[in-house]
């Protein structure tokens, strides 16, 4: 009786160990881009764009605001001399609102949807600076 019980426990432990080995998750680091796994699956995205005036000339030193509509967290970025801005490593599961401001003038607010599956979406923002 004792031997059958010992064998039963041994088999149970062997099965448990083999199952846990199959369910283990590798603890590797992230890639240099931070946007995809080795399998090629996208895990984050980078929003880029330009801040432009009404005549499509770039506006440098504008403040671009990015709001996570789920957490309400706001990030900001000052546009480059050529009007470009960049928000890396954004969650795929959240919607974001983005707009730009310079000297009291503001662009329309645009939305980056969680259903937009592009890895590098691009949204240009236009400010009417000649009011």
Image: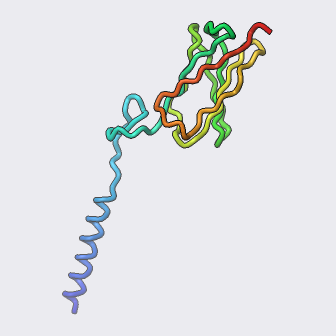
Quadrant hosting residue 11: bottom left
- What residue is at 62 percent from the left and 7 percent from the top? 57
In the picture, measured across the screen, residue 106 lies left or right of residue 9, that is right
- What residue is at 39 percent from the left and 36 percent from the top? 36
In the picture, measured across the screen, residue 83 lies left or right of residue 117, that is right
- In which quadrant will I find the C terminus? top right
In percent of width and height, residue 66 lies at: 64, 29
State the residue in front, 78 or 46. Answer: 46
State the residue in front, 99 or 74. Answer: 99
In percent of width and height, residue 121 lies at: 52, 28
In the picture, measured across the screen, residue 14 lies left or right of residue 66, that is left
As drawn, which residue projects farthest toward the left? 3
As drawn, which residue projects farthest toward the front? 55
- In which quadrant will I find the N terminus? bottom left
Q: Is residue 29 above or below residue 123?
A: below
- What residue is at 52 percent from the left and 39 percent from the top? 92
Quadrant hosting residue 99: top right
As drawn, which residue projects farthest toward the bottom? 1
């Amino acid at each position: 009786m004792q031997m059958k019980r010992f064998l039963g426990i041994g088999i149970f432990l062997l099965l448990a160990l083999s199952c846990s080995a199959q369910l283990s998750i590798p603890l590797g680091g992230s890639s240099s881009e931070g946007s995809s796994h080795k399998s090629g699956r996208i895990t984050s995205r980078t929003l880029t764009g330009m801040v432009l005036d009404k005549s499509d000339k770039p506006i440098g030193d504008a403040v671009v605001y990015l709001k996570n509509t789920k957490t309400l967290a706001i990030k900001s970025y000052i546009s480059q001399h050529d009007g470009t801005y960049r928000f890396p490593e954004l969650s795929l599961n959240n919607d974001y609102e983005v707009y730009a401001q310079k000297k009291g003038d503001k662009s329309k607010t645009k939305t980056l949807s969680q259903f937009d599956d592009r890895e590098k979406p691009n949204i240009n923002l236009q400010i009417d600076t000649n009011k």
